[in-house]
Image: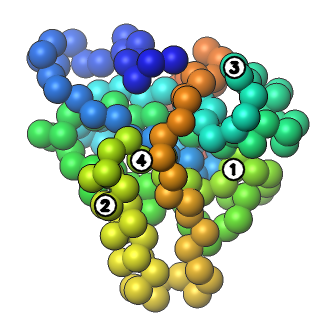
């Protein structure tokens, strides 16, 4: 898939010539991560999918088999004039436990790892600085396990996963 997402969910009032950027985060079950980012003013569109593995065109079943190496991720398209990448990093850090290795809450497996896929040298520097600041803050007793790696091929997940919680009137994966 290219870096352009199908954004049928972009607000009609958005200017058609908006210069957008992308950010990609893995922080556990992608349903909840997507729901968190969809609440952020300046986020134009989201898509859940798989990134960071070896199999071409993986399916949800492939990723859950723990043989592909993919993480469940959300790709966020955002308007940098309305929300900064640093603000998105703050949402990322605040909405999961970055000290967990290959798990979040009751979900476990390598697809639930904490990871930031950066799209530019500026995003890499911002992600590394925010991780270092969080580590230095003493907020967590365990080390931050979040990987910061270059973006790879993003495979969009099956349609039924897109905006999963929103379609069901839920705000959390574990209700």
Depth check, mark 2 against mark 1: the one in front is 2
Q: CA distance from mark 4 to mark 1?
A: 18 Å
Cα–Cα gap, marks 1 and 3: 18 Å
Above or below residue 115? Residue 37 is: above
Q: Residues within 10 Å of mark 1 (few under 14, many from 20)?
A: many
What residue is pinned by disc 4?
Answer: 118
Q: In the image, which disc is placed on residue 57?
A: 3
Which residue is pictured at 49% across the width and 27% down the height?
A: 47
- Separation (CA) of disc 3 from disc 2: 30 Å
The structure residue drawn at horizontal position 21% and vertical position 12%, both measured from the top left corner, is 12
Q: Position of residue 55 (x, y in %)?
A: 75, 28
Between 128 and 159, the one nearer to me in the picture: 128
Kindly indicate the quadrant of the structure image that contains residue 142.
bottom right
- From the image, state whether disc 1 or disc 3 is nearer to you: 3
Name the N-terminal-most of marks 2 and 1: 1
Mark toward the start of the polypeptide (3 vs 2): 3
Asked whether residue 83 is in view, the answer is yes
Task: Look at the image and tell me whether residue 175 can be seen.
Answer: no
Q: Which residue is mark 2?
A: 126
Whichever of labels 4 and 2 marks the residue nearer the N terminus, that label is: 4
- Element at badge 2? helix
- Helix, strand or loop at disc 4? strand
Q: Which element carries disc 3, helix, strand or loop?
A: loop
Whole-percent x and y of residue 16? 15, 12
Q: Nearer the viewer, residue 73 or 173?
A: 73
Going 45% across and 62% down the picture, which residue do you hit? 93
Residue placed at 12% from the left, 39% from the top?
A: 81
Report which residue position mark 1 lands on.
112
Chain-order first, disc 4 or disc 1: 1
């Amino acid at each position: 898939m290219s870096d352009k997402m199908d954004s049928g969910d972009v607000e009609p009032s958005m200017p058609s010539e908006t210069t957008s950027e992308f950010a990609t985060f893995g922080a556990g079950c992608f349903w909840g991560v997507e729901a968190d980012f969809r609440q952020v003013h300046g986020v134009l569109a989201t898509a859940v999918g798989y990134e960071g593995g070896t199999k071409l065109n993986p399916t949800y079943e492939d990723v859950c088999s723990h043989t592909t190496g993919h993480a469940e991720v959300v790709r966020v398209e955002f308007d940098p004039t309305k929300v900064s990448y640093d603000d998105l990093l703050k949402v990322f850090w605040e909405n999961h436990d970055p000290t967990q290795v290959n798990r979040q809450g009751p979900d476990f497996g390598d697809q639930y790892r904490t990871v930031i896929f950066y799209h530019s040298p500026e995003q890499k520097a911002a992600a590394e600085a925010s991780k270092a600041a969080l580590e230095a803050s003493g907020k967590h007793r365990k080390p931050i396990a979040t990987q910061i790696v270059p973006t790879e091929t993003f495979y969009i997940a099956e349609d039924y996963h897109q905006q999963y919680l929103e379609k069901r009137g839920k705000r959390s994966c574990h209700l």
